[in-house]
Amino acid sequence: MKDNFGRQITYMRLSVTDLCNLRCRYCMPEDGICKKRHEEILTEEEIILAVQAAASLGVTKLRITGGEPLVRCNILSICQHAAAVEGIEEVCLTTNGILLPELARPLRTAGVSRVNLSLDTLNAKKYAHITRRGTLDEAMAGLEAALSAGFDKVKINSVLIGGFNDDEIISLAELTKKYPVDVRFIELMPMYDNKDFDEKSYIPCSVVLDKLPEAVLQENTKDHGVAKLYRLPGAKGNIGLISPVSAHFCAQCNRIRLTADGKLKPCLHSSDEYSVKGLDFEGMKAQMEQAILAKPAFHAELSATSKSNAGRTMNQIGG
């Protein structure tokens, strides 16, 4: 289905929980969130019905997110049934990787074809600081497990934070030489007021190219999504630059989002939401049609002083 600006919507980001086993400073408050009642969260049956409704409108790609999706006890069943929906060609998953040593191979068997791992630093002390819990060793064990499980693609997502990891751009990028992975640098988005970040924290993706002058732009690459791809000499994977703040990509946006509590968001940075909780197939489909037609041409300005209008923290929407 196309929106009012001619964009073909083929991608749904599907959050299965707003809970997480970490407390990343740019994603959620230190004390976590107010836990929703069980009946407020989409059931597995509702999730699969929503996937079927989305597929009937032309969605072919799903990304399972959270919170941390692997903390949901029936995540393998959700992935297996979602991958089996007619019209769905690809099921991907974004995770912090902590639980991948136990779950990577079962996820691959369940039909997950690609995984993205969040990794913002290679320094153990800084990892503990930014996540507030968890260890770098656990995250790296998750990466190794993902690589050994046979996924079609493994990507690493690193949020750029001035004064925190801008001195690690080279070492993070060089993971593409050590492993067959893409490393994607993502600009920090001002999702909510947070004392941990000041104006100097928000740096553009252009600093990556300043640090890596030898990186070569990759032309005619397939399935790069919203990332601009570059490659270091001798690398096994690409470097991706994702710039939602300095150079938004709204004109190419092909996605909608469904939160764990059943709210469709036409745009990440809008407070508009359309509920599908408790609806049947036709009801969900009608709400999705409305949400797609409500997609704005572009989101409002984002900067250190212009916060997102999302109305929720990132873990409540789906990372």
Image (cartoon, rainbow, N blue to C red):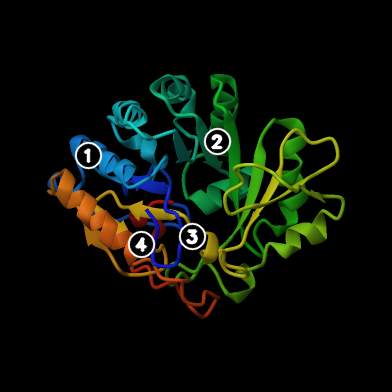
**Residue 172 makes an appearance in the image:** yes
Tell me which numbered mark, 3 or 4, is placed earlier along the sequence: 3
Element on which disc 1 rests:
helix
Query: Hey, what amino acid is under mark 1?
Result: Leu
Residue 73 percent location from the top left of the image: 28, 31
Residue 61 percent location from the top left of the image: 43, 41
Residue labelled with disc 1: 49
Name the residue at the bottom extreme.
305
Q: Residue at x 55, y 76 (%)?
A: 304
Disc 2/disc 3 C-alpha distance (Å): 18 Å
Give me the disc on residue 168. Answer: none
Disc 3/disc 4 C-alpha distance (Å): 22 Å
Query: Hey, what amino acid is under mark 2?
Result: Ala
Q: Is residue 254 left or right of 176 when viewed as pictured?
A: left
Disc 1/disc 3 C-alpha distance (Å): 32 Å
Query: Hey, what amino acid is under mark 3?
Result: Tyr
Element on which disc 4 rests:
loop
Q: Nearer the viewer, residue 65 or 140?
A: 65
Residue labelled with disc 2: 139
Q: Determine whether label 2 and label 3 are within 8 Å by CB.
A: no
Residue labelled with disc 4: 266
**Residue 277 makes an appearance in the image:** no
Residue 164 percent location from the top left of the image: 64, 59
Tell me which numbered mark, 2 or 4, is placed earlier along the sequence: 2
